[in-house]
Image (cartoon, grey):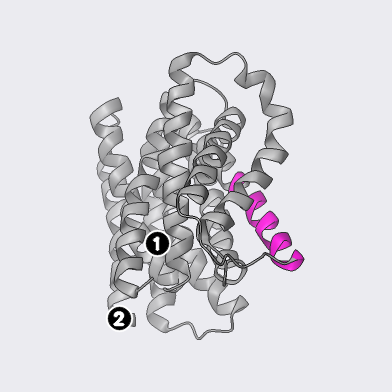
């Protein structure tokens, strides 16, 4: 994959990931059931993609790489749980803006784990993102749903940053669809025993929303995300994924009448502008 194709893939993945909160809110069930159902359809979709685009000389996965992919699956599942908890508690807008903190975590963790130099402009970006998160929530009362949802979303962003960095080292040399399939199989094995009683009571409409999550927002989007990280750095991917809250908030405004407040507009603008400014300085 060329760098240009990787950038196109990550942009499409950002759009699909941006719809995750919408489908998660439409599914009237618990975050655990949503994560498990999403994983189920993701496994089916990824298995189909793996057969359709089967490589003639597919490299076997070693035990160490399998272990890293399994850890990635646990991180992925934990990210889903915390994100959909944020959606249920505080709505799509706050959940997506809180999750948008993950580029700041990526910058800090990439510098620590990969010993890459973190520029002063990137430290400034982290500070501005933090200020944006302060503006997103009206107050910091832990009894407030907005604050609780934001904290769940920020935790989701941290878990996703760890996942993106792990994918940078765990997917080297293997088919991205195969890597995504391994991670989702791990997630499914961990969650399904606890979620099956909840899934058996879902309506057909709820199953449809879970299918949309699994096939498009996971199977396709996750494959594009993993494939792009083989070519571009995690921090570059994080910059493009800053557009995800824009997509999510726009659809939530349209479908659920979740009108952002002026503080949310200001906080979201700070988060997104800080990430884009950091990318321009890096170039």
On screen, 243 above or below 152? below
Q: For numbered disc 1, what is the local secondary structure?
A: helix
Residue at 30% over, 26% down: 256
Residue 262 is inside the magenta segment: no
On screen, 233 above or below 77? below
- Residue 152, percent from left and from top: 55, 43
Q: Which mark is residue 269?
A: none
Q: Which residue is mark 1?
A: 129
- Residue 209, percent from left and from top: 43, 27
Residue 76 is inside the magenta segment: yes
Distance, label 2 to label 1, CA atoms, is: 16 Å
Q: Which mark is residue 281?
A: 2
Q: Is residue 69 visible?
A: yes
Q: Is residue 139 visible?
A: no
- Characterize the local packing of mark 1: few (<14), some (14-19) or many (20 or more) Cα atoms within 10 angstroms: many
| Location of the C terminus (image quadrant) | bottom left
Residue at 37% over, 53% down: 13
In the rendered structure, the answer to whether residue 156 lies left or right of residue 1 reads right
Q: For numbered disc 2, what is the local secondary structure?
A: helix
Tell me where the magenta segment starts and ends, as one range. 63-77
Residue 235 occupies quadrant = bottom left
Whichever of callouts 2 and 1 sits on the residue coming sooner in the sequence is 1
Residue 196 occupies quadrant = top right
Nearest to the observer: residue 129 or residue 40: 40
């Amino acid at each position: 994959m060329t760098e240009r194709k990787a950038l196109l893939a990550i942009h499409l993945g950002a759009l699909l990931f941006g719809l995750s909160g919408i489908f998660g809110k439409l599914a009237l069930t618990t975050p655990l059931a949503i994560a498990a159902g999403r994983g189920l359809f993701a496994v089916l979709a990824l298995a189909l993609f793996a057969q359709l685009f089967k490589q003639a000389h597919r490299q076997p996965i070693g035990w160490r790489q399998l272990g890293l992919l399994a850890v990635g699956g646990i991180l992925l599942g934990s990210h889903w749980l915390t994100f959909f908890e944020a959606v249920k508690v505080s709505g799509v807008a706050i959940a997506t803006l809180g999750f948008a903190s993950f580029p700041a975590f990526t910058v800090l963790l990439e510098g620590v784990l990969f010993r890459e130099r973190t520029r002063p402009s990137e430290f400034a970006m982290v500070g501005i993102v933090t200020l944006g998160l302060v503006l997103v929530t009206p107050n910091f009362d832990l009894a407030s749903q907005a604050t609780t949802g934001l904290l769940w979303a920020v935790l989701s962003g941290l878990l996703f940053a760890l996942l993106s960095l792990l994918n940078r080292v765990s997917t080297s040399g293997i088919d991205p669809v195969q890597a995504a399939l391994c991670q989702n199989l791990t997630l499914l094995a961990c969650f399904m025993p606890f979620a099956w009683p909840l899934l058996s009571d879902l309506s057909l409409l709820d199953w449809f929303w879970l299918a949309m999550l699994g096939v498009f927002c996971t199977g396709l989007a996750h494959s594009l995300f993993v494939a792009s990280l083989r070519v571009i750095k995690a921090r570059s991917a994080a910059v493009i994924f800053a557009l995800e809250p824009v997509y999510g908030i726009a659809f939530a405004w349209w479908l659920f009448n979740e009108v952002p407040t002026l503080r949310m507009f200001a906080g979201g603008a700070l988060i997104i502008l800080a990430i884009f400014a950091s990318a321009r300085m890096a170039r």
